[in-house]
Image: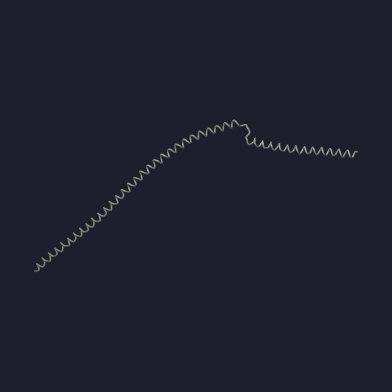
């Protein structure tokens, strides 16, 4: 009986061990399933993130292409403006040289002549002198008339006294 009891007990322990292994296996399978599910979820998230990144990459590449086109247009405009500036600089350098030559020529032509402002001042002073001379002439005439009147009066008074 003890032997039987030992055998039944051994069988029960084997069965219990077997059940424990199955539980561990099921737990492992369950953990694997959970891990597989988690990895699948992460994979799906990674794929969605990759798609989003691809969209952003495409958008950025499009933006870069547009910016390069804009840069080319701006550089072309800058180059055209530079050429225009150089043309204008040459044109105005020539004009400046011509005007400078004209000024030098006119200065040499009129080096000894009197400036217009000096002539105008001289004319104004001449008019003032002429006006002053006329006023002095009037004053002299009046003085001469008074002198003659006084002389006449003196003669008249001398004649009256001498009479």
Q: Is residue 64 left or right of residue 162?
A: left
Question: What residue occupies the far left of the structure in this picture?
Answer: 1
Q: Quadrant of the N terminus?
A: bottom left
| Viewer-nearest residue: 148 or 133 | 148
Residue 30's place in the image compared with 142, above or below, is below
| Viewer-nearest residue: 112 or 137 | 137
Q: Quadrant of residue 110?
A: top right
Question: What residue occupies the far bottom of the structure in this picture?
Answer: 1
Residue 162 in the image: x percent, y percent?
90, 38
Q: Quadrant of residue 7?
A: bottom left
Name the image colouring.
one colour
Q: Is residue 98 left or right of residue 10?
A: right
Residue 79 in the image: x percent, y percent?
42, 38
Number of marks present in the image shown:
0
Residue 123 in the image: x percent, y percent?
67, 36
Q: Quadrant of residue 4?
A: bottom left
């Amino acid at each position: 009986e003890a032997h039987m009891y030992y055998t039944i007990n051994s069988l029960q322990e084997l069965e219990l061990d077997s059940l424990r292994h199955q539980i561990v296996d099921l737990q492992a399978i369950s953990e694997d399933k959970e891990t597989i599910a988690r990895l699948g979820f992460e994979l799906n998230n990674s794929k969605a993130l990759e798609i989003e990144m691809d969209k952003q990459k495409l958008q950025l590449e499009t933006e870069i292409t547009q910016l390069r086109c804009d840069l080319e247009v701006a550089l072309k405009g800058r180059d055209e403006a530079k050429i225009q500036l150089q043309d204008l600089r040459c044109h105005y350098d020539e004009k400046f040289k011509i005007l400078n030559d004209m000024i030098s020529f006119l200065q040499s032509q009129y080096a000894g002549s009197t400036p217009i402002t000096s002539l105008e001042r001289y004319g104004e002073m001449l008019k003032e002198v002429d006006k002053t001379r006329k006023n002095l002439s009037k004053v002299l005439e009046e003085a001469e008339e008074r002198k003659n009147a006084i002389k006449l009066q003196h003669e008249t008074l001398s004649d009256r006294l001498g009479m």
